Image (spheres, rainbow, N blue to C red):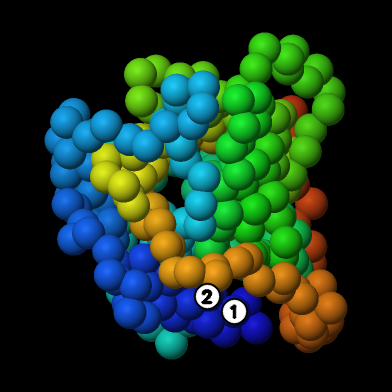
Amino acid sequence: MQRLLVLIAVVGIASVTALAQGGGGNAQPKPVCTTEYNPVEILRCGREAAKSFNPPRTADGKPDFSGYWGGSQVPHENLEAHPRTPDDNGGPSAIVDPPDGKVPIQAWAEEKRAENRKLYIDQNAQCFMSGVPRHLYMGAYQFIQTPTRLVMLSEEANAFRIVYLDDLPRLGPTLTLWQGDSRGRWEGNTLVVTTTNQNGNAWLDQQGRFITDAATVTERFTMFEANGILYEITIDDPLVYTRPFTMALGLRKNTQPGREIWEESCYEGESNTQYLRKLGYRTYPGFTAAQAKAAKEAYERRQGR
């Protein structure tokens, strides 16, 4: 079921991208960067184009990200490069740092990832929220921007995120959420969003890669042309990974007249979870910082360290 949903969503995104680039009779300027599905190239092209691009602005003078956006869903299947299979559409690694495109995961955590894949149901198959950053490589979106908020609405399970752009105090460390606590600040024309307080229940991809509630995710949104955003993501969870790692994706604006976000009936229409449970799979219970420390210590004892 989850594979079918991903295939349908990817076809939808391909249509969204085509429309945003001028399909459906809605002629648009030729994109400066046409490489949004190649992370290394969109990073290079987007950064270079952004140097001379003056983005549209809100009334308070900030770059205006309002509108409908879509992008690659390849990382949803696997953060690393992977071939096309009956389950996956295949694609390049989304990781641009380290340069080898590999997730710098600790040995004990790789063992845990394999266990996740073997035992648990991906939260997406059960219509739970995708967490950060997976929320933004899962489908089509509407960004609504005010001087103090950037709201990201998603077609996927009606999920949403709120990025706070003012100086409200952060949540306390004991309060965790599926989408975490996202706070944004401007560095020139780039919106930098730092997210903490995630609950550790969401995977980063269908391969079972995970973060704990101690993770910090830093996202950078840079508009490099009227209909293009360079989206960079750095994940820092020293309990799980040997170092922070960075991904790059391109978001393409859908300018089709009358565009709107669908109301996906995911919860109402989901029928595969019961089947997966009969096969022995269970709901992923999440993984906390305390559990990560204990799991690492147990792994090292088994290794005789």
Q: Which residue is mark 1?
A: 5
Position of residue 168 relative to residue 25, above or below, is above
Q: Residues within 10 Å of mark 1 (few under 14, many from 20)?
A: few
Q: Residue at x 36, y 25 (%)?
A: 189
- Checking the image for residue 155, the label placed there is none
Which one is in front, 49 or 202? 49
- Checking the image for residue 9, the label placed there is 2
- Asked if the residue under mark 2 is in contact with the one under mark 1, i.e. CB atoms within 8 Å, the reply is yes
Label 2 is placed on what type of residue? Ala
Which one is in front, 66 or 135? 66
Q: Quadrant of residue 53?
A: top left
Which one is in front, 34 or 24? 24
Picture coordinates of residue 58, whole percent (x, y): 49, 31
Picture coordinates of residue 59, whole percent (x, y): 51, 27
Q: What secondary structure is found at the residue carrying circle 2?
A: helix
Q: Nearer the viewer, mark 1 or mark 2?
A: 2
Give the alpha-carbon distance from disc 1 to disc 2, as whole Å.
6 Å
Q: Please say whether residue 78 is visible from this viewpoint.
A: no
Q: Residue at x 79, y 33 (%)?
A: 176
Location of the N terminus (image quadrant): bottom right
Number of marks present in the image shown: 2
Q: Residue at x 83, y 23 (%)?
A: 174
Which one is in front, 265 or 253? 253
